[in-house]
Amino acid sequence: MPLGRIFNRLSKDLNSVDNNIPNYFSNTLVFVFFALTNIVIVLVVAPVYVFLPVILFYLICCHLLHRYTSAPQRDLTRLEGFTKSPIVSCFT
């Protein structure tokens, strides 16, 4: 494995740990709080038989969207790593 790829991978991993994970955790907590609040409000206002089909449809759409976008996202991340590697190896 070329030295540029190793440095690129190491710097990207450390950047992810230092910057992205706390933000993702914070955003996840906010979204979970908002989702639970919305579900409680809708269940209080609307009957369950009206709300249940809507939430099932939403969950199915989210699952299909995730399946549709996860493979291209993985390929783009891999391509980004390969395009950065020659630049980092030139600096070393």
Image (spheres, grey):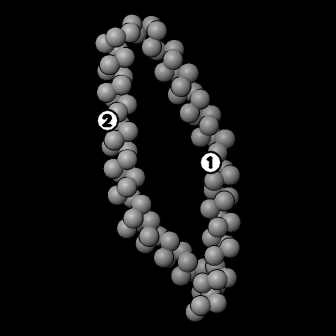
From what the image shows, is residue 63 above or below residue 4? above
Residue 79 seen by the camera:
yes
Q: Is residue 43 left or right of residue 52?
A: left
Q: Where is mark 2, residue-wise?
A: 33
Residue 1 seen by the camera:
no
Secondary structure beneath dot 2 equals: helix
**How many neighbours does mark 2 have within 10 angstroms: few (below 14), some (14-19), or many (20 or more)?**
few
Measured as percent of width and height from the top left, residue 47 is found at 39, 7
Q: Where is mark 1, residue-wise?
A: 70
Measured as percent of width and height from the top left, residue 68 is found at 67, 41
From what the image shows, is residue 92 above or below residue 57? below
- Disc 2/disc 1 C-alpha distance (Å): 25 Å
Residue 33 image-quadrant placement: top left
Q: Which amino acid does label 1 sit on?
A: Ser
**Residue drawn at x 37%, y 67% as measured from the top left:** 18
Whichever of labels 2 and 1 marks the residue nearer the N terminus, that label is: 2
Q: What residue type is labelled 2?
A: Phe
Between residue 43 and residue 63, name the one nearer to us. 43
Q: In which quarter of the image is the N terminus?
A: bottom right
Q: In which quarter of the image is the C terminus?
A: bottom right
**Residue drawn at x 52%, y 21% as measured from the top left:** 56
Measured as percent of width and height from the top left, residue 22 is found at 34, 58
**Residue drawn at x 32%, y 19% as measured from the top left:** 41
**Residue drawn at x 64%, y 67% as measured from the top left:** 80
Measured as percent of width and height from the top left, residue 45 is found at 34, 11
